[in-house]
Amino acid sequence: MSCHPGQLARRLQQVTYQLWTTTVSTETTPPQFVVLNSLLADPDIDQRTLGERASLDRSTVADVVARLVQRGLIRRVRDPRDGRRNVLRLTKRGESTHGQVADRIDQMNDKLLAPLSEEEQGALLSMLTRIVDQDGPR
């Protein structure tokens, strides 16, 4: 079998998705978690800024935000500094969901990286970071 990086990346995404659904959550998707995580780290940001921080395009972040609002995990509030715009904020339920999912992500990552030594894990993460960062945020 020849080594095609794109094919391996696609297969890695499949493996990761399968691990996510069996180990982490069937209700909260990886993009939804990235949004929850971004809002925990930096509350009261607008949707455009959130999309930039989460590396999600405009239509994806709009869909993810709508779903999380519907689930009661985030809410839109008037920006206290500029009443003309809305910002996003985690609800208590959103904070709780984030904590539950974050705990399970550690378990998933342990399973995903188990075939590699600690040194190999660090090298893989470093190389993947260089690849995704090569052309800046999306």
Image (cartoon, rainbow, N blue to C red):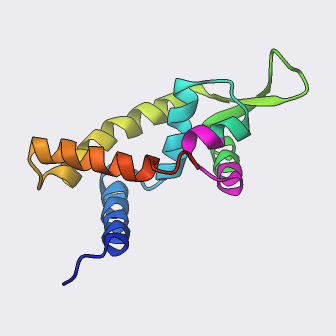
Part of the protein shown in magenta: 51-63
Q: Is residue 111 left or right of residue 77?
A: left
Query: Which of the two residues, 20 or 27, is positioned nearer the viewer here?
Result: 20
Secondary structure character of the magenta stretch overall: helix
Query: Which of the two residues, 97 or 85, is positioned nearer the viewer here?
Result: 85
Estimate the x, y position of residue 39 in percent, counting from the top left: 58, 30
In which quadrant is the N terminus drawn? bottom left
Estimate the x, y position of residue 97 in percent, counting from the top left: 48, 36
Determine the residue positioned at 53% across, 27% down.
40
Determine the residue positioned at 55% across, 45% down.
137
**Can residue 68 be seen in this snapshot?**
yes
Query: Which of the two residues, 106 or 97, is positioned nearer the viewer here?
Result: 106
Residue 53, image quadrant: top right
| Image mark count | 0
Point out the residue furthest to the right here: 84
Q: Is residue 74 left or right of residue 2?
A: right
Query: Which of the two residues, 126 or 108, is positioned nearer the viewer here?
Result: 126
Residue 112, image quadrant: bottom left
Q: Is residue 32 left or right of residue 4?
A: right
Estimate the x, y position of residue 120 in percent, counting from the top left: 14, 48
Point out the residue furthest to the front here: 134
Q: Is residue 132 left or right of residue 111?
A: right
Point out the residue furthest to the bottom here: 1
**Can residue 93 be seen in this snapshot?**
no
Determine the residue positioned at 72% across, 40% down.
48
Image height of 82 relative to 32, above or below: above
Estimate the x, y position of residue 14 in percent, counting from the top left: 35, 68
Point out the residue furthest to the top here: 81
In the rendered image, residue 60 lying in the magenta stretch gets the answer yes
In the rendered image, residue 133 lying in the magenta stretch gets the answer no
